[in-house]
Amino acid sequence: MFTLETAQRRLRAGAYVRISSDPFETEKGVGRQREDVLVKAEGLDWDVVEFYEENDTSAYKKRRIRLPDGRSVWRVIRPEFRRMLADYEDGKIDAIIVYDLDRLARQNRDLEDLIDLVEHFQRPVQGVTGGLDLMTDSGKVMARVLVAMANKSSADTARRVSRQRLQAAQDGQLLSPVRAFGWKPDRLTLDPKESDLLRRAALRYLAGESWSTVTRMIADSGLPTVRGGQWRIRTVKCMILSPRIAGLMVYTGQARPTSNLAPAGTDEARAMLKDPRDMALKTAEGQYVQGRWKQIITVEQWESIVAEYEQRRDGVGFSSYNTRKHLLSGLLRCGQTRADGSLCHTVMVGSATKNRAGQSVPIYRCPGKIHGGCGRSQRNLAKLDKLVEDLLFRHLETNRPQAGAGLALAADPIDPSLDDVQTRMKQLNEAVATGVITMDTFLAVIPGLEKQKKELITVRARASRSEASRHRRLRSPEAVRREWDDDATVAGRRALLSQYLLAVVVGKSQTKGPVFDHASITPAWKGDS
């Protein structure tokens, strides 16, 4: 409270200085405000006992904040401003000096918080440029009007900047605000070591390796992250799934550039993991917009990776995804006949049993009836792993590709039906722009076409993935053997097996005791068509 005692001594003032943008952190703007605030305090016969400085800090932009009950609110984050209000309320300062009202607040919520305190404690707030008086009703009204005008000015500027950035993005000119892993500081040319590592990681994931294995490979390379933190699975996911890796512009819905560094837990990262294709900026005709930077992988490879990611996420097909401990987990099928004459065909799992000496022996077994299996098949784990390895390389030798066979492979042309959908979307955009159809009609039709387009792109990407898989199967047995021996991890070898095998059927054994019945094991190979 402003009392007779405080009136008889020099007031202890808190000085708030702020500038919205200082990308080079020179602090010249806040420095000039500091000087002017001190001159104003001397003229008022006040002592500035505390500076509340926020350099390169917006008073307009809001951030999403999660409340304890899980709900969200959007607030301007200004720690020093909030500290000043707390000191004002606690009596650590008797007054506030700011350079100007628009330095103090650009959101009415922030202004109202200060007005509430002024009304209760009756401590003055002064501006260097004059015209700021929160002690009177007319002064409060004027402050509210000026803050509302400042808010509109910020909104207008943000809209113009966003439109400018969107245009730059549509022209492929907009660069990410920070260097992305894989590129040099100019954000255009590739860093040889980082880009090669990221390319190998992306293609190994496409070949069937798990996110954890790919992340471990990147971490073991010794190359640091751009921000200097630890390599995490979610970080690697965002890097490989980002359209940027294929040279495509990324669009977050806010017309601002983004890198492949979407931090874990952010809305951007969640959107990237939910639907990577929706993050790619497209023209009115539905075509991807190419950026100026060099691509690390092709667009076709990126679409195949996204299709692989969606397939694994939806639980379709065998791969090293969600690998447990054993080479053939998820690949083995029980070939026993059930009591009703049907084939069991249950996935066999890794387990253990006791031998005659009481020692634990790892096995693959069919789960019991309570888990959907018949419980009648089991095989020695190490012997079956070795047999399937031998069968793989025997198959490769028998089906050794002819010289030059891989040269005949070519990418399929765009599906005509996809082209038709994109043409129709373009026509609708033109029709609504020229007033031929109403916006209501446009909004009623366009979602269905967007869904149809997405489905067609998914089909094409899966076809591209299948073609890439067929191309990999044309490698020589020697090349596959080198890859098998170089990567002794379970995930890496499972990835290789997934390229050639559909399943391995474990039939009824015709031998007794410890003798392994090789003839009861039947591999089902992926065809070359």
Image (cartoon, rainbow, N blue to C red):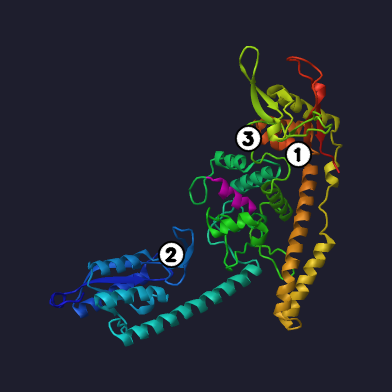
Name the residue that disc number 2 marks.
Answer: 24
* Proximity of marks 2 and 1: CB atoms separated by less than 8 Å: no
Indicate whether 252 appears above or below 319: below
Indicate whether 129 appears above or below 387: below
Question: In the picture, residue 34 is in which quadrant?
Answer: bottom left
Question: Disc 2 marks which amino acid?
Answer: Phe
Image point 57% across, 68% down: which residue? 254
SS for callout 3? loop
Name the residue that disc number 1 marks.
Answer: 499
Residue 324 has which mark? 3
Image point 60% across, 64% down: which residue? 252
- Spatial CA distance of label 3 from label 2 is 49 Å
SS for callout 2? loop
| Lower position in the chain sequence, tag 2 or tag 1 | 2
Residue 259 in view of the camera = no
Question: Disc 1 marks which amino acid?
Answer: Gln
Q: Quadrant of the N terminus?
A: bottom left
- Spatial CA distance of label 1 from label 3 is 19 Å
In-image side of 6 versus 355 (left or right): left
Is label 2 or label 1 in front? 1
The segment highlighted magenta reads 231-241
The residue carrying pointer 2 sits among few (fewer than 14), some (14 to 19) or many (20 or more) residues within 10 Å by Cα, namely few
Indicate whether 326 appears above or below 314: above
- Farthest residue to the top: give it: 357
Question: Disc 3 marks which amino acid?
Answer: Arg
